[in-house]
Image (spheres, rainbow, N blue to C red):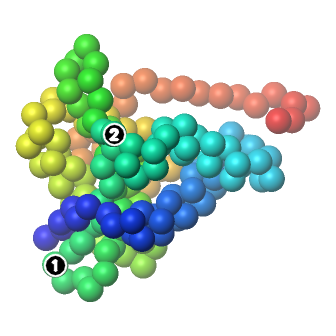
Amino acid sequence: MLKLVPMSKSEFTEYESVALANYASDLLKADRRNPNTAAARADEAFRKILSKGQDTPDHHFFVLFESNASAGVGWLWLGETTSEYGRSAFIYDILVRPEYRGQGHGTRALQAAEVWASALGMQHIDLHVFGHNTGAQRLYNRAGYCATNIRMRRMLAGVTQ
């Protein structure tokens, strides 16, 4: 059984390091960004959303713990939002450590997020997934998520970023 355990300060520091590296890698794949600027862009986006770091209001950080594991198998970052559709959760990040991938932890993390959001009276959960991340897309589709909009891009010959 997977449990969401609030991150300690030291766990957040570890998560932040892994998350920033993963996000920079995703930016490189998605936008063909300059490898020298991708890390800075990832850091800038992270700081913009989390103006007070782990203490930013309406942002919740969890370590994913399985009952049979001695350490966390990954991390989950959830946000609370309100819109014309009511209160909802947003999955900013779900990261399963590489050695634990393919064992159902992602599915159980999504289920735990649903329990968390439902307990707070939220109507739905949103998330963003990069187009190149087909594994995550399959996970989300299997869990009942559906695309609400799709943004596409075609790079033109001779254009550099």
Q: Nearer the viewer, residue 133 or 36?
A: 36
The numbered mark, 1 or 2, whose residue comes first in the sequence reads 2
Find disc 1 in the rendering and name its residue. 67
Q: Quadrant of residue 108?
A: bottom left
Q: Quadrant of residue 92?
A: top left
Q: Is residue 118 above or below residue 40?
A: above
Number of numbered discs present? 2
Q: Are the two marked residues, 1 and 2, in contact with CB atoms closer than 8 angstroms?
A: no
At 33% from the left edge and 55% from the top edge, which residue is drawn?
61
Residue 1 is left or right of residue 14, and the answer is left
Find disc 2 in the rendering and name its residue. 57
Residue 41 can be seen, yes or no: yes
In the rendered structure, which amino acid carries the disc numbered 1? Ser
Q: Nearer the viewer, residue 19 or 14?
A: 14
Q: Is residue 161 above or below residue 15?
A: above
Q: Position of residue 17 (x, y in %)?
A: 55, 64
In the rendered structure, which amino acid carries the disc numbered 2? Pro
Which structural element holds mark 1? Answer: loop
Which structural element holds mark 2? Answer: loop
Residue 124 is left or right of residue 75, and the answer is left
At 23% from the left edge and 65% from the top edge, which residue is drawn?
5
Q: In which quadrant will I find the C terminus?
A: top right
**Residue 77's disc number:** none
Q: Position of residue 124 (x, y in %)?
A: 20, 32
Q: Nearer the viewer, residue 25 or 132?
A: 25
Question: Which of label 1 and label 2 is nearer to you?
Answer: 2
- Residue count near mark 1 (Cα–Cα under 10 Å), binned few <14, some 14–19, many ≥20: few
